[in-house]
Amino acid sequence: MTEATNQAGPAAQDTGEILHGIDAAIDENAEWMQRWHRAIICGEAPDPSVVSQYAQFLSRFGSWMDLNRDQGLLDQAAFRALGRAHEDMHEFGRFLALKAAEGEAIPTVEYGAFVEKVRLFNTQARRIRDAFRMAVSELDPLTGVPNRQIMMQVLERERERALRTGVPCCIVLADIDYFKAVNDSYGHVAGDHVLRTVAGRFLANLRRYDEIFRYGGEEFLICLPSANAERASEIVERLRQSLANAPVPLPDGGELPITASFGLCLAAARVPLKQTIEFADAALYQAKDEGRNRLRLWQPGEPA
C-alpha cells in the first residue's frame, strides 16, 4: 500500500493471524510430543520432525516464525523469547531421541529438563495467545482501532487524570458524511475500505497519546488528553483536512471524495462522562445541520 492511511486494518489482520498461528503451534506441539514419546518409549524409528537437525523448521510454527520473525507484531521480545524456547525444546528433544536410538538410557534428570523445556514453551505460547485474545476482543476487526468495549474505561481514566492534574481533556465525535450513500452506490466492500482508510488517516494525524475508538457504524470517538478547546480544534482540523484534501482511492482504481463532521466538548469537573459524550454528539449534529465537513464546539448552555 502506498497510502499511509491504511494503517489500521493490517493490525487487526496480523493479530488474528498470530492467534491462529499460536493456537496451531500448541496443537502441533502436542502431536510432536506424541511422536517423540513413541520413539523413546516404544522404540519406533524416530520421525524426521524429531531427529532432523532442521526439526524446528519442519514444524509449521517454526517455519512461520522464521519467515515472519522481523515483521510487524512478531518483532517483539515476547515472540523472540517464544522462538528461542521452541528452538531449545526441539534441539534438546533431538539430542535425547538420537541418544535413545543408539541404545543409551536417558537419565531422569535429562528427561526432566526436556519436560521443563516443553512446559516453558507451552506456557509462553498460552500467555501470548491469551494476551492477543484479549486484544482481539477489544479491537474493532474492520478498522483495527479499539471498540466500545473498553472505551468507557479508558475515557474514565483520562477524565480522572484531567481532574487530578488540572490539565484539560476534550472528547470528539466524528461521523463520515453521507456514508450510507457510499454503501448504496459502491457496495459494502467499498464502504469497508472507506472506514479503514478514514481510521488510518485519523491515526496518522493524531498525537501518540490520543485515543480513538470505533463508536459505531461510521462514527469514531476521539479522546484528546492535555488539550484545551483551542488545541483540540487544531487537531480536529488536521483530521478534517486529511479527508477533505485527498479522495479515498478505491480497490477498483477509482477515487471517492470523503469528508467528515466533528462535534467537540471539553470535559468538565462536574459533568459526568456520559453527558460529555452527549454534548459532543449534540455539537456533531449541529455541524451536520450547518452543512457538514466542519467542526462544531459545544458551548455550555446549549441543549444536549
Image (cartoon, rainbow, N blue to C red):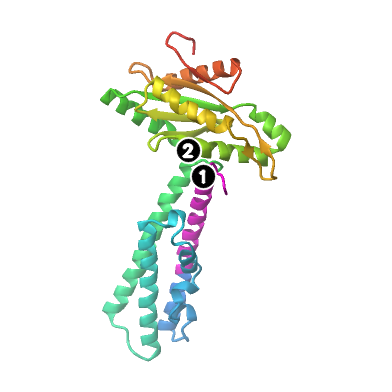
Q: Position of residue 298 (x, y in %)?
A: 46, 15
- On the picture, is 60 further left or further right than 81? right
Question: Is label 1 in a helix, a strand or a loop?
Answer: loop
Dot 2 crowding, Cα within 10 Å, few <14, some 14–19, many 20+: many
Q: Are marks 2 and 1 in contact (CB under 8 Å)?
A: yes
Q: Position of residue 296 (x, y in %)?
A: 50, 18
What residue lies at 33% left-to-right and 18% top-to-bottom? 269
Q: Position of residue 90 (x, y in %)?
A: 40, 74
The answer to if 18 sits in the magenta stretch is yes
Residue under circle 1?
A: 7
The mark nearer the N terminus, 2 or 1, is: 1
Question: Is label 2 in a helix, a strand or a loop?
Answer: helix
The answer to if 210 sits in the magenta stretch is no
Residue under circle 2?
A: 203
Q: Which residues are magenta?
A: 1-29
Q: Residue 176 lies in what quarter of the image?
A: top right
Residue type (three-letter) at the residue carrying disc 1: Gln
- On the picture, is 114 further left or further right than 178? left
